[in-house]
Amino acid sequence: MSALLQEMSNRALRLGVPLSAQIDLTYRCNEQCVHCYLDHDDHGEMSTVEIKNLLSEMAEAGVFILTLSGGEIFMRKDFFEILEHARALTFCIKLKTNAVLVREKQAARLRDLGVESIQVSIYSHRPEVHDAITKVPGSLRRSVDAIRFLRSQGLKVVIANVLMTGNMRDHHGVRALADELGARYTLDPTITPMMDGDRSILDLKADVSELRTLFRDEAYVGNAEEFCAPPPAPSEEVMDSLPCSAGHTGCYVSPYGEFYPCVAFPLSCGNVRQQSFIDIWRNSDQLKEVRSIRLRDLSGCSQCAHGATCTRCPGMAFLEGNMRGPSTSDCEKSFARTGIPSKNLLAKKEKPASARLVQIQLVPTITGIRLSGMSNAVITLGA
Amino acid sequence: MSRKLYVARSPRIAARKLGEEMLVMAAQGSTLFTLNPTATILWQAADGATPIEEIVEHRICSEFEVTPEEALRDAEALAQDLAEHGILLISEEPITPKSPVQEQLRQ
């Protein structure tokens, strides 16, 4: 994040402004990725009018950076109508897509509409690997062709490479492909449980030894010794810091109007079909609770050696059953990085394995992996 | 008689008011800018139809203690600066969606 954007985020926090938001326009998708935790059926998506009204309310509330994602955004026939409305409201628009439906015509239109960036999911440079993950033959070729169309229009493209067991060896190939295409590159080893509580897809995630190798790859982390150094003790300032921007300056709305602190944090705070966006943002009890949490309030994490540097995702912690608790996948990343087990991992070692953790809330499912578009070759460790 | 100068907000930017300042991002280069209150007034009034002299006279001189000459000089320099960053369009003719300056953006 640039210093200016950080300064603006701090100001938004002081003013209580939702500076950034994500709307998933649909959960329908033309790919069936093995690691996706969405239910792709349509359970009553917001209409074009409802989404346009929501966008107007968001602009009024101060949302500046708007991410449109899914599902697959181009599955909505009214996608460009929605996008035009959003641009007329002068949002800074980021898109997340598999780009399978993007050809020259769509790329030119995105350029004319002044879209800031387009994030495209690519799992491997090898068709047999990528297409096996998406379960759509020819999908890598379609997505790569689309990236060429987008780049030829001068658009900024970010290739998002989710890592899992099936493509763990291919990240250098994807990165080289990104370089060839003039795209930025991010990779993320995070796999998220299904929203109905099914954690079986977590079997796809990279194990600690694979993460360890990744975190020592200087092509991604810069100075590996520095990156993997033992964490410093958390200062008082860190203990009083916020876990992440979820619910503080950022939020998420599902295709069904459900309002969450973040796409990866499915705590329902209201529904924009029943309440105005700003009413939920200002008055939701759930959001107030999320905003009250500081590092010193976290059970286990507040006494953990990794407190100062952990990338703990409150949404993943929530999915484990306690938004004030640890996120085990982030504990594993901290362990893989430094070789020092977190307090949570040590506690798990002492106790026999407990019953399977379940997602408690019955909420509409939310979209896949959280992938942050940052600078070239950035590993996304968490929020 | 001096030439008239028209200014219009570029259609390729994103913008939002945050407190007293305006956040502006040009799609090209993804560079973020903040406009101070004076620049924000100029930017908001840049409708392509109102000459910059009128904007200065009616929107800036009425708000700030500044002479019209000084305000116009500063506003023109600011407009030039914003135009160089792709945030504002400048023309000696009124700027409409069909103006040559808008057409250039589409190429």
Image (tube, coloured by chain):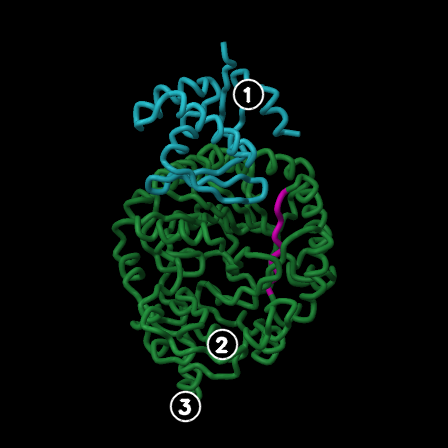
Chain colours: A green, B cyan
Question: SS at mark 3?
Answer: helix
Residue B57 lies, in percent from the top left, at 36, 19
Which label sits in the foreground, 1 or 2? 1
Q: Give the magenta part as a residue range.
A: A155-162
Residue at the disc numbered 2: A334
Are discs 1 and 2 less than 8 Å apart at CB?
A: no
Element under label 2? Answer: helix
Residue at horizontal 69 percent and vertical 38 percent from the top: A104
Residue tagged 1: B91
Which amino acid type is marked by label 1?
Answer: Ser
Q: Mark yes or no: residue B101 visible.
A: yes
Residue A158 located left or right of residue A169:
left
**What amino acid is found at the position of numbered circle 3 in the picture?**
Glu
Task: Look at 68% across and 44% down and name the residue there.
Answer: A151
Circle 3 sits on which residue? Answer: A350
How many discs appear?
3
Q: Residues within 10 Å of mark 2 (few under 14, many from 20)?
A: many
